[in-house]
Amino acid sequence: MSALVGRTDTSVVIDAPLDLVWDMTNDVESWPGLFAEYASVRILGRDGDTVRFRLTTHPDEHGQVWSWISEHTSDREALRVTSRRVEPGPLEYVGVEWIYSEEPGGRTRMRWIQDFRMRPDAAPDVAAMTGLVNADALTQMGIIREEIEKAAR
C-alpha cells in the first residue's frame, strides 16, 4: 500500500428497519439534512442505479468550503452501495463501500469501508488523515442514526 493511501472501516447499528435505513441513506437529495457536513447537493444526472452529483460542504474551521462531484451506485439486492469521487476535493481519491445488514430486533447495521488517496501536497500524513476520516465517519454515522431513529418513531 502506498504511503499516501489510507483505509477506514466503521459501522453503526440503527434502531430502524432495513428498508427505512436504505431509503433514507440512498436519497442523495436529502443528504444536507442527514449529514452535518454538507451544505448542498445538486444532482447532475442519473443512469440506472447510479446518481452523479455535486456536494458542497459547510465552511470548515478555517472558512474553507469544499465542493466535488461524486457518483453513488446502489445495489438493493446485494445491500451494497459504492461511492466514489469523480473529481478530487481535499483528497485526491475517495471510494466508499456502504454495506447494510439486518440485525436482531428489527435493527440495521450500516458499515462504511472508505479508501482514500492523499494529494501529494497534503499537509497531514496518512496516519493523521486516517484518524480524521475515521472520526468524521463516526460523527456522521451518529447523526445519521439519530435522524433515522427519529423518523422510525
Image (cartoon, rainbow, N blue to C red):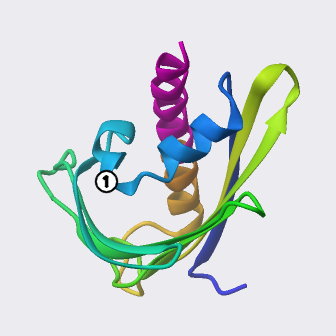
Judged from this view, the residue extending furthest toward the right is 104
Q: Is residue 26 left or right of residue 120?
A: right
Judged from this view, the residue extending furthest toward the left is 63
Count neighbours of disc 1 (C-alpha within 10 A) and say few if under 14, some if 14 to 19, many if 20 or more: some
Specify the amino acid type for callout 1.
Glu
The N terminus, quarter of image: bottom right
Residue 27, x across and y down, in percent: 42, 51
Front one among 132 and 36: 36
User: Which residue is pictured at 46% across the width and 30% down the height?
Assistant: 143
**Residue at which label 1 appears:** 29
User: Which residue is pictured at 74% across the width and 38% down the height?
Assistant: 109
Residue 98, x across and y down, in percent: 65, 58
Circle count: 1
**Magenta-highlighted stretch: main secondary structure?**
helix
Q: Is residue 99 left or right of residue 67?
A: right
Front one among 29 and 13: 29
Front one among 65 and 68: 68
Q: Is residue 76 left or right of residue 43?
A: right
Residue 60, x across and y down, in percent: 21, 49
User: Is 140 contained in the magenta span?
Assistant: yes
User: Which residue is pictured at 53% across the width and 58% down the height?
Assistant: 128
Front one among 129 and 100: 100
Quarter assignment of residue 68? bottom left
Residue 63, x across and y down, in percent: 11, 51
Segment tinted magenta in the rendering:
137-153
